[in-house]
Amino acid sequence: MSEAGVAKKFMFVNRTAPYGSVYALESLEVVLISAAFDQDVALVFIEDGVYQLKKGQQTKGIETKNFSPTYRALEGYDVEKLYVESESLAARGLSEADLIVDVQVLPSTELGRLMDEQDVVLSF
Amino acid sequence: MKFGILVNEGPYQHQASDSAYLFCKAALAKGHAVHRVFFYHDGVNNSTRLTEPPQDDRNIVARWSKLAADHGVDLVVCVAAALRRGIRDENLAPGFRISGLGQLVETGIQSDRLVVFGD
């Protein structure tokens, strides 16, 4: 149980590309803290957010840290609910095989239902 | 109802901080409680006392400080995001305090609603 003695359902909605803005990196930091607080954490990747999970990220040229390996470490924090919107993948010519972690690919209607079940939805 | 607020954008550049402030004012006026306002990403720039807008513009930082003074709203700035952007205790405006992301998660747990203001 958390310090506050309550476990809520936290959902993180990741909408932005991994580089170009700091949202993705700093979102991941909140995810890890939420997990440390023993909350019920789920991650959703929609729109350009699906690029956060793309295999083969090379960031040397932009002198920015490649933080994509962190997604693979989430399992160790018991963060295992990762959802990717099928429409966003398809619109970008990507498939599940392009992603660095195991995810559940769901249509937006299903994701909407999941969001409805959450206590806290944070969108970055 | 008890609200938690998350501000993800800097002042003047983006409307998020204005909207969050006006939301807090309206909620308090209706008798609701604002448990905490947490500043993250460029939102941490809302907390610097070095801000000096032109005379004919609103003073976003001073407005937040007044909200804290008048209503006891807890204004918390993320330490990692703040240090990245040169925000430290010595240039913090009144009413703000620097702490960790755990304070955001705790607000999510303790509030009835966590409202996010950002892009």
Image (cartoon, grey):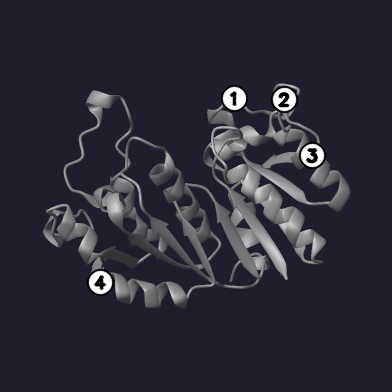
According to the picture, the residue beneath numbered tag 3 turns out to be: B65
Residue A107 got which mark? 4
Whether tag 4 and tag 1 are in contact, CB under 8 A, the answer is: no
Say what amino acid the circle numbered 3 marks. Answer: Ser
Asked if marks 1 and 2 touch (Cβ < 8 Å), the reply is: yes
The reply to whether discs 4 and 3 touch (Cβ–Cβ < 8 Å) is: no
Residues indicated by labels 1 and 2 sit on the same polypeptide chain:
yes
Name the front one of labels 4 and 2. Answer: 4
Under circle 4, the secondary element is loop
- Residue A115 on image: x %, y %: 43, 72
The disc at residue B86 is: 1
Q: Is residue B16 left or right of residue B75?
A: left
The kind of secondary structure element at disc 1 is loop
Which amino acid type is marked by label 2? Asn
Q: Is residue B24 above or below residue A119?
A: above
Mark 4 or 1: in front is: 4
How many numbered marks does the figure carry? 4
Query: How far across and how far down the image is residue A54, in percent?
Result: 20, 49
Asked if the residues shown at circle 3 and circle 1 are in contact, with their CB atoms under 8 angstroms apart, the answer is no
Q: CA distance from mark 1 to mark 2?
A: 9 Å
Around disc 1, counting alpha carbons within 10 Å, would you say few (fewer than 14), some (14 to 19), or many (20 or more)?
Answer: few
